[in-house]
Image (spheres, rainbow, N blue to C red):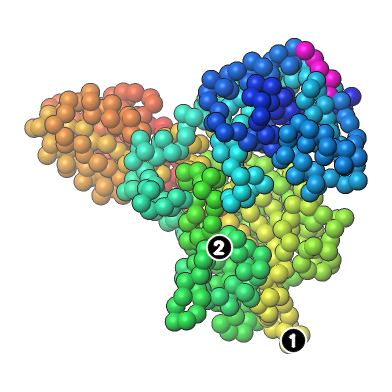
Amino acid sequence: MEPFSLEVLRHSTSHLLAQAVLELFPGTQAGIGPAVDNGFFYDFLRDCPFSVEDLSAIEAKMREVVAADMPLEKLTLAKDEAIRLFEGMGQTLKVELIREKGGDSVTCYRQGSFVDFCLGPHLASTGALPHFKLLSVSGAYWKGDEKGIQLQRIHGTAFPTRKELDDYLTLLEEAKKRDHRRLGLDLDLFSTAEELGGGLILWHPKGGRIRAIIEQYWRERHWAGGYDVLYTPHIGREVLWQTSGHLDFYKDGMYSPMDIDGQNYYLKPMNCPFHILIYKSRMRSYRDLPLRWAELGTVYRYERSGVLHGLLRVRGFTQDDAHIICTPDQMEAEILRVLDFSTSVLGAFGFTDTKIELSVRDPKNTTKYAGSDEMWRTAEASLVKALDARGVAYERMEGEAVFYGPKIDIKVKDAIGRLWQCTTIQFDFNEPERFKMAYIAEDGREHQPYMIHRTLLGSLERFFGILIEHYNGNFPLWLAPVQVEVLPIADRHDDYARALEARIKAAGLRAHADLRREKLNYKIREAERLKVPLILVAGDKEVAAGTASLRVHGQGDKGTVNLTEFLARVKALDDDKSLSVNL
């Protein structure tokens, strides 16, 4: 029996899916069917689209195959023999894969009449796969080529136990309720538009207010943390991207050039070359270092239309970029400083439960990485020392480093347990060399500095989407676009409501008086629907006494409040960046 793992179970379930589809829909071409995060998928070529009813029928057929408890038999065939086998079954996509990927012999797996070209491993029999669920159908391209054949991808998930499956399906239902795209529309935060183009975001006034609050907090923390804030253009000449290496290694992620005065210019996919040009604008001394430069820089990267997803996967986004340029002996202290700074800022937004990954070189293939062995050893040791110094657990990811340096990734866990990639702390041995960066050291000679890339929130768009889903739109008081909604009971209370709104704003808080000619209960329901943290109601009694009746979102009626005491308390909560409202 092959060793058990969740990946093996899910890969085996993808074969279960493929067998069911080919038996129910003769003539269907099978593509690939790997295990992926949280489940599996299988791609099929078929003239008719799969329907919801088809998925139900496929699930039923899969359960029949599970009940039959068919053994998964490993076959080793000569390449020509395997090609003849799949040609005989009419599976031309499999034949193409075997021709491309197969060696002198190929591995296949058989269960009943179904055979798949696959390296494995798999579980011993289909009877070990009872806990699965098909989730959706989407489009996919053969081999990921948008100019290639369009396939249908059936997504599913599988777990070792029924309870784990049920828990995951419950999580999916909760995630649907928190979907930032729906909440963004309901709360009037942002939108997209077909006329504008996919992957481009329109920030509405309320979403823009939250973004401005995040940006201001970001700047204040960076200034206090010893950073300087930079601003750089959105485009640059072709020669800049040639020097940086982006046209060699990243051109598929860049947009087509624009001709300006007979020269090609590109929208920037990254901010780092601009920061390097600022560094190179004059000679630097070791006395100038370290330099900590940060920018909220908008970048543009090509993403295929099929992967665009609300705020989470876009084509234009503002990256909270920073670059630390330092001497080799400053590197360890700077990494530790960045690590502490990042976890502190993420914590202010309510993300205190994190997973940390350390991505390093593949020790078996060091030739594909830039920089000397000594630089890699020094950089990896610095990252490890910083993590160990703070006593944080981390997972070592061999072979996951990018070619120009090792990195630390910080993933935050949201309210329902999902992990989101936010902070990256990345060494770069490549660009300092390409741009011939230098500083005058104590010995009077030029030396090459080390450079650390760092994104903290990742991008404002994606981070905002994560915030929406984490809080289910119930933003903490300090982030809420409207902190206090003022509701007059009748027309005669409007002047008092206006004065109260002005008083709240004068205290440095965000308020809105709802003066519409609607009944009070309707206004309360609207304020609750819009998830305003605090609601003040004013009628005859409150006007006469100079008070207001308070409601707290999610907590209900709190009775009459003294306005001076109320404003002092709310302002303190706002200043403290409190994540809960206790009044």
418, above or below 226, in the image: above
The amino acid on which the numbered mark 1 sits, given as a three-letter code, is: Arg
Q: In this view, does 473 lie to the left or right of 446?
A: left
Sooner in the amino-acid sequence: mark 1 or mark 2: 2
The amino acid on which the numbered mark 2 sits, given as a three-letter code, is: Met
In the picture, the disc for residue 570 is: none
Circle 2: element type: loop
* Residue 46 figure quarter: top right
* Residue 473 figure quarter: top left
Residue at 57% in and 33% down: 47
Q: Is residue 46 left or right of residue 65?
A: left
Pair 1/2: label in front: 2
Residue 373 screen position, x and y as percent? 84, 66
244, above or below 315, in the image: below
Query: Can residue 58 be seen by looking at this rendering?
Result: yes
Q: Please say whether residue 197 is one of the residues in the magenta stretch.
A: no
Residue under numbered circle 1: 445
Q: Nearer the viewer, residue 41 or 243?
A: 41
**What span is colored magenta in the figure?**
68-72
Q: Nearer the viewer, residue 436 or 74?
A: 74
